[in-house]
Amino acid sequence: MYNEYTALLKKEDNWWVGWIEEVSGVNCQEKTYDELKKTLAITLKEALEFNRQDALLAAGSGYKEEKIAI
């Protein structure tokens, strides 16, 4: 499965800062544009995996899993 997310990237003084628009809390700061894009991708993957594990833990057992497309 391939998902796309929107990165907001901005140069502030000597730093590049960025956020993932669709996922709260995914933001990074790096010295270069390319480093920022890589770090955002890594942080997004980690956040999605953390959220996935958190949901599975909260659901416990006996749940049904379904894909939802928007």
Image (cartoon, rainbow, N blue to C red):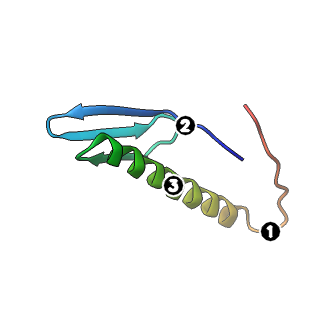
- Give the residue drawn at x 73%, y 61%: 59
Disc 1 versus disc 3: nearer the observer: 3
Label 3 is placed on what type of residue? Ala
Q: Nearer the viewer, mark 1 or mark 2?
A: 2
Circle nearer the N terminus (1, 3): 3
Q: Residue furthest left?
A: 13
Q: Secondary structure at mark 3?
A: helix
Q: Is residue 35 above or below residue 49?
A: above
Q: Earlier in the sequence, mark 1 or mark 2?
A: 2
User: Which residue in the rendered view is the most extreme toward the front?
Assistant: 34
> For residue 56, what is the image quadrant?
bottom right
Looking at the figure, which quarter contains the C terminus? top right
Write the residue at 72% across / 47% down.
Answer: 1
The answer for how far apart the CA atoms under marks 1 and 3 are is: 23 Å
Residue that mark 1 sits on: 61
Q: Residues within 10 Å of mark 3 (few under 14, many from 20)?
A: some
Question: x, y (%) of residue 37?
Answer: 40, 44
Residue at figure coordinates x 41%, y 49% from the top left = 38
Q: On residue 5, which mark appears? A: 2
Q: Quadrant of residue 27?
A: top left
Q: Which label sits on residue 48?
A: none
- Asked whether the beta carbons under mark 3 and mark 2 sit within 8 Å of each other, the answer is no
Residue 63 coordinates in the image, percent (x, y): 82, 60
Q: Secondary structure at mark 1?
A: loop
The three-letter code of the residue at mark 1 reads Ser
Q: Secondary structure at mark 2?
A: loop
| Residue 67 vs residue 33, the one in the foreground | 33
Q: Nearest to the eye among marks 3 and 2: give it.
A: 2
Q: Give the label on residue 47, or none.
A: 3
Res. 34 image quadrant: top left
